Image (tube, helix red, strand yellow):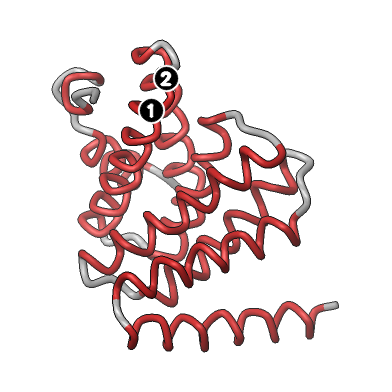
């Protein structure tokens, strides 16, 4: 596995996220850019070695969540930025992009739970980021939202029954708001 601290000089990914957030006017774009750039650097360093890159993306997500918490960022915006950054950085399309979004959603929820963050806010950001990223890449936004919701619920089951229950309610509320807009 790649050493994420060494890859970008002396700054670990978490510090990169914190610095980007502290300078940014748009936290979502700051996180998306930092995550995307880090993934692109990881892929280049790994020469596209599949599993190593997949594990490294998980490490990038963990570091991004930790950095967002340290910087005091809104976790919904952080999750949205991470989701967008994953799509940009992996440059996946179609089914592979949906798979990347699902992995990102699970990892964001899991790591948000580990740091004691608001899971409902993180879930909202994952869904928003998946929809935004899908639209930007010409993918099916409804499929992206469904994939994000599924991955969120999978991750919540691993966190615990209370988290799963709370996230089911949060996702139902988001679904109701989306239907009201149409």
**Mark 1 nearby-residue class (10 Å; few <14, some 14–19, many ≥20):** many
The circle drawn on residue 43 is: 2
**Mark 2 nearby-residue class (10 Å; few <14, some 14–19, many ≥20):** some
Quadrant in which the N terminus appears: top left
**x, y percentage for residue 123?**
48, 69
Q: Residue at x 34, y 75 (%)?
A: 118
Question: Which badge, 1 or 2, comes first in the chain's sequence?
Answer: 2
Q: Is residue 180 left or right of residue 32?
A: right
Q: Compared to 98, does 174 lie above or below? A: below
- The answer to whether mark 1 and mark 2 are in CB contact below 8 A is yes
Q: Residue at x 55, y 49 (%)?
A: 101
The circle drawn on residue 53 is: 1
Q: Is residue 96 left or right of residue 81?
A: right
Q: Compared to 110, does 138 lie above or below? A: above
Check the image and name the residue furthest to the right: 182
Q: Secondary structure at mark 2?
A: helix
């Amino acid at each position: 596995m790649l050493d994420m601290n060494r890859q970008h000089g002396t700054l670990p990914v978490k510090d990169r996220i914190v610095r980007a957030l502290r300078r940014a006017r748009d936290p979502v774009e700051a996180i998306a850019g930092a995550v995307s750039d880090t993934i692109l650097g990881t892929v280049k360093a790994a020469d596209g070695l599949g599993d190593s890159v997949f594990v490294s993306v998980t490490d990038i997500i963990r570091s991004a969540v930790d950095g967002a918490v340290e910087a005091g960022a809104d976790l919904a915006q952080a999750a949205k930025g991470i989701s967008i950054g994953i799509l940009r950085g992996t440059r996946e399309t179609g089914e592979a992009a949906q798979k990347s979004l699902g992995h990102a959603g699970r990892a964001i929820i899991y790591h948000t739970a580990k740091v004691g963050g608001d899971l409902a806010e993180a879930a909202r950001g994952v869904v928003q980021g998946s929809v935004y990223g899908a639209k930007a890449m010409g993918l099916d936004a409804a499929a992206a939202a469904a994939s994000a919701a599924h991955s969120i619920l999978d991750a919540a089951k691993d966190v615990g029954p209370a988290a799963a229950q709370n996230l089911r309610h949060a996702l139902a509320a988001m679904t109701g708001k989306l239907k009201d807009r149409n």
